[in-house]
């Protein structure tokens, strides 16, 4: 697709969708902000009117400044297929992710595949994530053993592990939130003692590229533990120079997910992207996407040496 092409000639050809190369419609997702300055994917879709027959087709891959129409035809067709599957998940698996969230995660995994992907939770959408990253490694952590065994029958090729959470509560939101506030008030060592649990040996030392927190369900267990341990993994991974880690936390409209993400991943709205939308049940849902990049010490050393050389030459 070049500046001389008409919108209809872009690949894939979608009616009534503006061509990305025209200045009046070229906007990246990162520039779409609501009144509070929080980056949102939903508002970007609405502002650019990338909607056709009720099916949202985002023309931009998240955070990449890489429009779909710049992909090779085979890659564009493959992504289009995954987007259709994401739309199916939204329509048929109610009360899970919103369509905006399914398309966002789909595109993020598609861009980074093959990659090492760790997902807290084994669900109906696990096959989609595994298929997108079929040439990489996708590992799932599930705490309900009966459900895990059932899903193993349906998805025998998926790498899934049983993970028993340390924190157990009565099925009462207020009790969970009181314990959350107690944990947040503790010092780092006390938090470590309460929340630390080593992953299975073959998962602990993997260089994860993407971590998705979508478990446990809001019942006896909460996501305090999975969020904190994702942060712990991230801190270890950032010791590798030049490594980038993406962490996505689903259901951040809820108190525990929001406050633990604020505390351990970052509360500055500029440090994350909000992927918001409504489930078919019309329940609002928010997912946060954090991206962390380690410091390349070699580059920093070279930069210091260059600065020292320039300062010396100026004397």
Image (tube, rainbow, N blue to C red):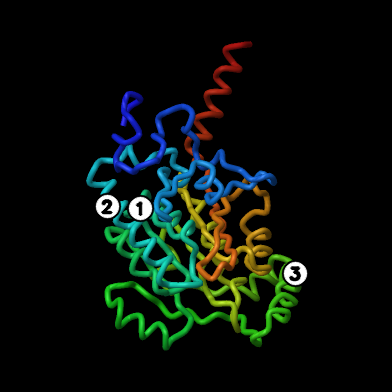
Which residue is at a point 43% across and 86% down the rendered structure image?
145
Instruction: Give percent across and percent down for residue 213.
Output: 51, 66
Q: Nearer the viewer, residue 114 or 20?
A: 20
Which sits earlier in the primary sequence, circle 2 or circle 3? 2
Camera-side mark, 3 or 1: 1
Please tell me which of labels 3 and 1 falls first in the chain: 1
Count neighbours of disc 1 (C-alpha within 10 A) and say few if under 14, some if 14 to 19, many if 20 or more.
many
Q: Which mark is residue 78?
A: 2
Q: Secondary structure at mark 2?
A: helix
| Quarter assignment of residue 170 | bottom right
Question: In the displayed structure, would residue 70 be above or below residue 231?
Answer: above
Eye-nearest disc, 2 or 3: 2
Q: CA distance from mark 3 to mark 1?
A: 39 Å
Where is residue 195 drawn, in percent x and y? 62, 73
Position in image of residue 157 (x %, y %): 27, 73
Residue 233 vs residue 123: left or right? right
Residue at image position (28%, 61%) is 134
Q: Nearer the viewer, residue 188 or 213?
A: 213
Q: CA–CA distance between discs 2 and 3? A: 48 Å
Q: Earlier in the sequence, mark 2 or mark 1?
A: 2
Q: Is residue 155 above or below residue 249?
A: below
- Which numbered tag is attached to residue 110? 1
Tell me the mark number nearer the camera, choosing from 2 and 1.
2
Give me the residue at 73% from left, 67% from top. 184
Q: Tell me how far mark 2 sits from mark 1, CA to CA.
A: 9 Å
Q: Secondary structure at mark 3?
A: loop
- Numbered disc 1: secondary structure: helix
Q: Residue at x 68, y 60 (%)?
A: 263
């Amino acid at each position: 697709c070049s500046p001389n092409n008409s919108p209809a000639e872009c690949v894939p050809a979608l009616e009534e969708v503006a061509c990305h190369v025209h200045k009046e419609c070229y906007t990246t997702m990162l520039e779409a902000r609501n009144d509070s300055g929080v980056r949102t994917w939903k508002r970007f879709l609405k502002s650019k009117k990338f909607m056709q027959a009720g099916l949202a087709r985002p023309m931009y891959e998240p955070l990449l400044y890489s429009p779909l129409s710049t992909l090779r035809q085979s890659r564009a067709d493959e992504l289009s297929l995954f987007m259709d599957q994401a739309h199916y998940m939204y329509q048929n698996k109610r009360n899970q992710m919103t369509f905006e969230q399914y398309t966002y995660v789909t595109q993020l995994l598609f861009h980074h595949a093959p990659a090492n992907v760790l997902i807290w939770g084994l669900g109906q959408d696990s096959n989609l994530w595994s298929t997108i990253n079929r040439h990489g490694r996708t590992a799932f952590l599930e705490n309900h053993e009966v459900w895990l065994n059932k899903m193993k029958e349906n998805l025998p090729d998926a790498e899934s592990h049983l993970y028993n959470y340390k924190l157990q509560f009565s099925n009462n939101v207020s009790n969970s939130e009181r314990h959350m506030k107690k944990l947040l008030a503790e010092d780092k060592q006390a938090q470590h003692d309460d929340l630390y649990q080593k992953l299975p040996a073959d998962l602990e030392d993997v260089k994860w590229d993407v971590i998705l927190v979508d478990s446990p369900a809001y019942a006896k267990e909460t996501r305090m533990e999975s969020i904190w341990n994702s942060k712990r993994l991230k801190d270890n991974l950032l010791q590798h120079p030049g490594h980038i880690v993406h962490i996505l936390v689903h259901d951040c409209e809820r108190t525990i997910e929001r406050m633990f993400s604020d505390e351990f991943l970052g509360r500055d709205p500029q440090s994350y992207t909000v992927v918001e939308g409504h489930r078919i049940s019309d329940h609002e849902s928010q997912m946060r996407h954090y991206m962390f990049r380690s410091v390349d010490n070699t580059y920093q050393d070279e930069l210091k040496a260059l600065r020292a050389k320039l300062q010396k030459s100026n004397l």
